[in-house]
Image (cartoon, grey):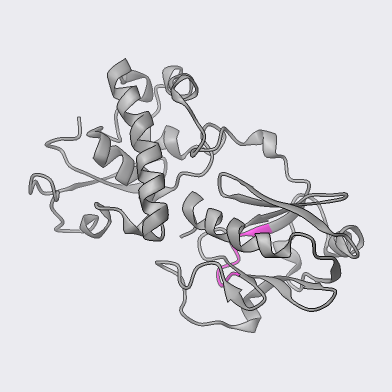
Amino acid sequence: MPEILEIEAYRRLAEKVVGRVVSEVQAPDHWYVKGGATPEDLVENLTNRRFTKSRRKGKLLLLDSGGPTLGLRFGMTGRLFVDGKAGIDQLEWGSRRINPAWHRFIIEFKGGGSLVIDDPRRLGGVELNPQEERLGPDAWEIRLPGLRKVLSNSTTALKARLLDQSRIAGLGNLLVDEICWRSSLDPNRPANSLEEKEIKILNRTIRTVLDQLDKRGGSHTGDFFEHRNKGGVCPLDAQPLRRSEAGGRTTWWCPLHQR
């Protein structure tokens, strides 16, 4: 599913539309338009606009123009195409097919070319001027003081806190399991129970995991990924993994070294 790494890949692809002028906007799936806007609002506000910048905050892709900002969210199965090229060839649990019926949002450009969101499960969405301030600091940019603040005032499970997009933007289920596993931290621990040395390790690990898995090709390329299933054992110490729930998500962790 798209997490911060996948959206960063989409952002890099979306750089190709910077400088282009919108000639046509299509939003055939009205439900896909969020934030109180309508398909007609998208047409009115984006047609003849030139995109000036492609940027990202957490899992939110943003395209600035001389007027409104277009926000693109991809849910679990959304993929971005620019001029027919996919930002990611295939999501780990997404479909291999390309079906025009799944094209939820389309922009055509003057002089040719297009931007398309393909989303079989319709869990993403598009909106004008999304409220970026509701998101926490970007996970790739958060530093030790910010992470310390996020953790220190919460008794919720560590994994749930890291998944909370209003606290830290961008981390998803796969990345948080990888980060907790590498940090030797039990994802079910209260967030405010971490000692200073553990917070420092967690802060370094977040950056390391994002940098490494970005180079490898996505959130599903972690060292822990293939072991996160029934009967799986920890690749560090061969201990049978445990399965639990944290933040409403299935969580896999090693009871021997994650404490």
Looking at the picture, does residue 24 appear above or below residue 164? Answer: below
Q: Main secondary structure of the magenta part?
A: loop
Looking at the image, residue 101 sits to the left or right of residue 77; the answer is right
Image quadrant of residue 118? Answer: bottom right
The front one of 4 and 255 is 4
- Magenta-drawn segment: 118-125
Looking at the picture, does residue 168 appear above or below residue 67? Answer: above
Q: How many marks?
A: 0
Percent x, y for residue 103?
66, 75
Looking at the image, residue 198 sits to the left or right of residue 147; the answer is left
The residue at the far left in this view is 238
* Residue found at x 85% / y 65%: 21
Looking at the picture, does residue 12 appear above or below residue 193? Answer: below
Percent x, y for residue 108?
79, 74
Percent x, y for residue 207?
40, 38
Q: Is residue 197 magenta?
A: no
* Residue found at x 68% / y 39%: 132
Looking at the picture, does residue 238 appear above or below residue 122? Answer: above
Looking at the image, residue 16 sits to the left or right of residue 238; the answer is right
The front one of 204 and 1 is 204
Q: Quadrant of the C terminus?
A: top left
Percent x, y for residue 101?
65, 81
* Residue found at x 61% / y 56%: 11
Q: Is residue 203 visible?
A: yes
Q: Is residue 195 visible?
A: no
* Residue found at x 9% / y 46%: 239
